[in-house]
Image (cartoon, rainbow, N blue to C red):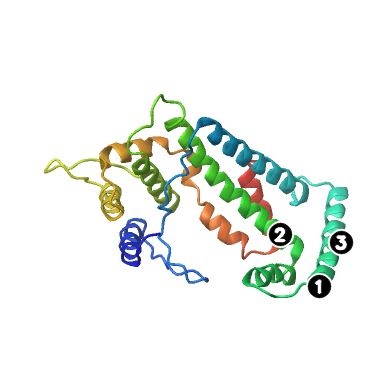
Amino acid sequence: MLADDKVDSLNAVVGKLIGREHKPRTLFGQYTPIIDVSRANVHESKKEFMVELAAVEAVMASLKSIIDQIVPDDEKDTPERKAMLDRLSLAIEGKAVQHARQKSLNSAGDLALKNIFDTGFHYGTMRLIIAMYLIYREHLAELKDQEAQFWTVSSRPPNYYARTIALRLARLYSRENGKPPTFGMSREGNFPSTDFGRALEEVFRILEIKASVRNAATWAIAQLTDDDLRQPVNALAGLLGFPDRSLLPIANAMMGR
């Protein structure tokens, strides 16, 4: 966990880079940085790594299967399927109402679950499933990054944490701006000449990362794909607030339909 002053400094630097403020305190009082600064889950052996990779891929496949079964598609669904989904949602909702009456509130977790029941269990859990898929997909991307950097070479690459932070910042910048960041060095001295480069240099200083900003930034920018230009954070926020049918375009985009 970062000290509060470091969280403040980090949020100020990254917030300025992407052009928006970050409210660090969550509903549960946690003090959070604007980007994930945790160290990647480096494994002790390739076998250990492969076990986790297989588990994450299996979870994503299962979640996709669930979404394919219960998320409506107005453009492709037959009248029979639409009728089935309507019957299913009514049946599940009815059972959920009965189940909710038997639940007691003994913890914050109980309250969170009750809120899902009270606001519509069928579509509420659908939103959670899609959110879960998006989060697992993000973790899978990091595992794939680890696989490329870590388990396909004979020895551990240097400055792995520096690369991880640079890539997270580059992805955040890309999603917020719809374009990848750039990096360059000033002709007047050995320091970054772009906003992204200067911000990354400050982030490294705050996190006490002793590594080449140029190497980490250049590598991170080269890893970006078209998917990194989209805004999963905004999509996820929409999932939590839009009407039920708004799940459709989000789910379709997420699944690449």
Mark 3 nearby-residue class (10 Å; few <14, some 14–19, many ≥20): few
Q: Residue furthest left?
A: 188
* Residue appearing at x 11%, y 43% in the figure: 188
- Image quadrant for the N terminus? bottom left
Q: Earlier in the sequence, mark 1 or mark 3?
A: 3
Q: Determine whether 140 is above or below 124 in the image.
A: above
Badge 2 is on which residue?
Answer: 125
Q: Is residue 129 above or below residue 154?
A: below
Can you tell which of label 2 and label 1 is closer to the viewer? 1
Q: Are the residues tagged 2 and 1 within 8 Å (C-beta)?
A: no
Contact check, label 1 and label 3, Cβ < 8 Å:
no
Q: Which circle's residue, 2 or 3, is located before the other in the chain?
A: 3
Residue 112 % position (x, y): 65, 69
Q: Quadrant of the C terminus?
A: top right
Residue 55: percent from the left, percent from the top? 63, 40
Please state which of the two labelled residues, at mark 1 or mark 3, is closer to the viewer: 1
**Residue type of the residue flagged with mark 2:** Thr
Which of the marked residues, 2 or 1, is nearer the chain's N terminus? 1
Q: Amino acid at mark 3?
A: Ala
In percent of width and height, residue 104 lies at 74, 75
From this viewpoint, which residue is outermost toward the top?
154
Residue hosting label 3: 91
Measured in 3D between alpha carbons, the distance from the residue under mark 2 to the one under mark 1, in whole angstroms, is 19 Å
- What number is the disc on residue 167? none
Circle 3 sits in a helix, a strand or a loop, which is it?
helix
Residue assigned mark 1: 102
Question: Seen in the image, is 225 located left or right of residue 12?
Answer: right
Quick check: marks 2 and 3 in contact, CB under 8 Å?
Answer: no
Looking at the rendering, which quadrant does residue 222 occupy?
Answer: top left
Task: Provide the secondary structure element on which disc 1 rests.
Answer: loop
Mark 1, Cα crowd under 10 Å, few <14 / some 14-19 / many 20+, is few
